[in-house]
Image (cartoon, helix red, strand yellow):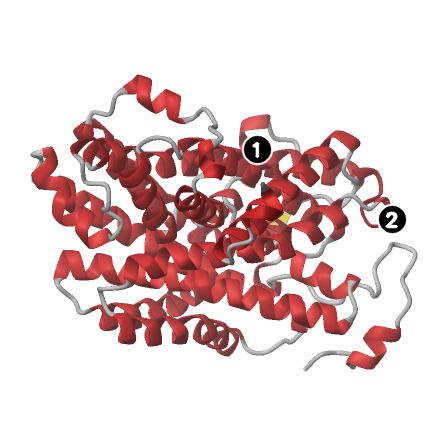
C-alpha cells in the first residue's frame, strides 16, 4: 500500500529541494548500491565497474519491434530511412545521459520523480500511459520471441508467447545471485545478435555509397505519409519510453560516493557506458535495415515487412543456407533480452508511480501479467497473419507515448532546485528541448495525416 493518501499527496507543499516529498524508498531496493565501485583505481577499471546498465538500456533499442519497422523500411524505401535510425540514436544517447544524471543526482528513478513532483491525478495518468507503452513494447518482444521459436523449432505462436513469461523466473534467479549476472547475460546475447548481423551484412553485400547516402536526412521522409508512418515506428522502436524509467533506476545499483565529486564521476562513466552501448544498438538497427534493403529492395521485393517472410526469403535470395537460421537466432536472442529488461522496467514503473512494496516474485508476476496478457490475446486472435502490422503499430504507440516521459525528464534535469550544480547547462537544454520538439512534431504530423488534417502542416 502507498505510504500516504492521495489527499495528503495533493496538499503537500514543495520542499526546499523542489520535490513534494522526500525520497522514502530506494529504486529496485533489492539491488540498490549492490555493485561495488572501488576507490583508487585507474580509468579503465573504473569504467569497467560502471559498465553494464547501458547495455540493459541498449537492449530496448534492438528489440523485435525494431526488426518489424526496419524490415518494412528497408524493403519499401531502400536505405532512405537510415537517417531516421541515426537521428533517433543520437536522441537516445542524449536522453539516456539525462536519465543517468537524474538517477545519480536526485536518487530517484523517473517514475519516483514524477510521483514526487506532480499531483496524484497527474502522476496516476502518467502511470497509466506508461503501462500502455509497456504493453505495446511487450507485444513486440513477446511476438518476436514466439515467431523466432516458431521459425527455429516449429513451436506454435501461442505456446511461444506463454514460454516468454518464464523470464520472470530467470530475472529472479539471476538478481538473487547478483545484478552483474543479469548484465553479463544481456551483454552475451547482444554479442550474439551483433555477430549474426555482421555475417548477414557480409552475405548481402550492400553498396557502400548507397548506404552512406542513406544516412543523409531527406525531406521526403516527412512528405511521404507511408514513409513517415514507418519513420515514426522507427523512432518509437529506437527511443523507448520504458528505457528512460529503467536507466534512471539501474544506474543506482552502483555504490559510488554520494559526494558532489563522486556524483560527477558517476555521471561521466554512466554516460560513457550508455553511449558505447547505444552505438552497438545503432549498428544492429542499421544492419537490419541494410540487409533488408540490399536483399529485398534491390530485387524488387518491396513488401517484405513480416519477419517469417524475411526468414523464408533470406537464404534463397542470398544463396547462403545459414542466413535464415542466423536471422532467427538473432531474433530469439533479441526477444529474450528485451523481455528480461522489460520485466525490470515494469517493476520500476509500478513501484515508482504507485509507491507499493510487495514480495519480489509477486510484484514481477503482476507487472509481467499486465504486459503479457494483451500479447496472448492478440496472438490468439490474429496468429501469424497480422503479426507484422501489430509489431509496427506497437512501435507507433510507443512513439505517441514518448513525449509524456521525455518532457518530465527534461524538466527535472533542468531544474536547479532539484539538481543543484548538476542542472542541465543551456546548450543541453537547447538540444533536449529540440529533441522533444522533433518527437512531438512528428507525432502531430502523423496524427494529422491519419485524420486527414494535413492542411495544418502545409
Helix or strand or loop: what does disc 2 sit on? helix
Closer to viewer: mark 1 or mark 2: 2
- Visible residue check, residue 118: yes
- Are discs 1 and 2 less than 8 Å apart at CB? no
Look at 27% across and 50% down and name the residue there: 331
Residue 134 image point, x, y percent: 49, 63
Task: Quadrant for the N terminus, please.
Answer: bottom right
104 over 341 or under it: above or below: above
Q: Residue furthest top?
A: 209
Q: Is residue 9 left or right of residue 36?
A: right
239 over 268 or under it: above or below: below
**How far, Cα to Cα, is label 1 from label 2?**
26 Å
Q: Nearer the viewer, residue 177 or 197?
A: 197
Look at 45% across and 43% down and name the residue there: 228
Look at 30% across and 51% down and name the residue there: 333
Q: Nearer the viewer, residue 116 or 10?
A: 10
Q: Is residue 28 left or right of residue 189?
A: right
Mark 1 or 2 closer to N-term?
1
Residue 358 image point, x, y percent: 59, 78
| Residue underneath mark 2 | 417
| Residue underneath mark 1 | 272
Q: Nearer the viewer, residue 161 or 439?
A: 439
Amino acid at each position: 500500500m502507498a505510504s500516504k493518501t492521495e489527499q495528503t499527496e495533493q496538499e503537500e507543499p514543495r520542499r526546499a529541494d523542489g520535490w513534494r516529498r522526500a525520497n522514502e524508498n530506494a529504486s529496485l531496493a533489492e539491488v540498490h548500491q549492490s555493485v561495488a565501485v572501488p576507490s583508487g583505481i585507474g580509468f579503465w577499471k573504473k569504467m569497467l565497474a560502471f559498465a553494464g546498465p547501458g547495455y540493459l538500456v541498449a537492449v530496448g533499442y534492438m528489440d523485435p519491434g525494431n526488426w518489424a519497422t526496419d524490415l518494412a523500411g528497408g524493403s519499401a524505401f531502400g536505405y532512405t530511412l537510415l537517417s531516421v535510425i541515426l537521428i533517433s540514436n543520437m536522441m537516445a544517447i542524449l536522453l539516456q545521459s539525462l536519465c543517468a544524471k537524474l538517477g545519480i543526482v536526485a536518487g530517484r528513478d523517473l517514475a519516483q520523480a514524477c510521483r514526487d513532483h506532480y499531483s496524484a491525478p497527474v502522476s496516476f495518468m502518467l502511470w497509466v500511459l506508461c503501462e500502455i507503452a509497456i504493453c505495446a513494447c511487450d507485444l513486440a518482444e513477446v511476438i518476436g520471441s514466439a515467431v523466432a521459436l516458431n521459425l527455429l523449432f516449429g513451436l506454435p505462436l501461442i505456446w511461444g508467447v506463454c514460454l516468454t513469461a518464464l523470464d520472470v523466473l530467470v530475472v529472479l534467479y539471476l538478481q538473487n545471485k547478483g545484478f552483474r549476472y543479469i548484465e553479463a547475460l544481456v551483454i552475451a546475447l547482444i554479442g550474439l545478435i551483433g555477430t549474426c548481423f555482421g555475417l548477414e551484412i557480409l552475405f548481402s553485400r550492400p553498396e557502400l555509397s548507397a548506404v552512406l547516402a542513406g544516412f543523409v536526412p531527406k525531406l521526403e521522409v516527412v512528405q511521404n505519409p507511408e514513409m513517415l508512418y514507418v519513420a515514426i515506428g522507427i523512432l518509437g522502436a529506437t527511443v523507448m519510453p520504458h528505457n528512460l524509467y529503467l536507466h534512471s533506476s539501474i544506474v543506482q545499483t552502483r555504490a559510488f560516493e554520494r559526494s558532489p565529486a563522486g556524483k560527477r564521476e558517476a555521471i561521466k562513466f554512466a554516460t560513457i557506458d550508455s553511449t558505447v552501448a547505444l552505438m552497438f544498438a545503432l549498428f544492429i538497427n542499421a544492419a537490419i535495415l541494410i540487409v533488408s534493403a540490399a536483399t529485398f529492395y534491390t530485387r524488387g521485393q518491396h513488401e517484405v515487412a513480416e519477419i517469417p517472410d524475411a526468414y523464408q526469403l533470406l537464404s534463397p535470395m542470398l544463396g547462403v543456407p545459414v542466413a535464415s537460421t542466423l536471422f532467427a537466432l538473432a531474433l530469439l536472442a533479441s526477444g529474450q533480452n528485451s523481455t528480461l529488461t522489460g520485466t525490470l522496467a515494469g517493476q520500476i514503473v509500478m513501484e515508482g508511480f504507485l509507491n507499493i512494496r510487495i514480495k519480489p516474485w509477486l510484484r514481477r508476476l503482476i507487472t509481467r501479467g499486465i504486459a503479457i496478457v494483451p500479447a496472448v490475446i492478440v496472438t490468439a486472435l490474429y496468429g501469424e497473419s497480422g503479426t507484422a502490422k501489430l509489431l509496427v503499430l506497437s512501435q507507433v504507440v510507443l512513439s505517441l507515448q514518448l513525449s509524456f516521459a521525455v518532457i518530465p525528464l527534461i524538466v527535472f534535469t533542468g531544474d536547479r532546485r532539484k539538481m543543484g550544480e548538476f542542472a542541465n547547462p543551456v546548450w543541453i537544454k537547447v538540444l533536449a528541448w529540440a529533441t522533444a520538439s522533433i518527437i512531438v512534431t512528428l507525432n502531430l504530423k502523423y496524427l494529422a495525416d491519419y485524420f486527414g488534417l494535413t492542411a495544418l502542416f502545409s
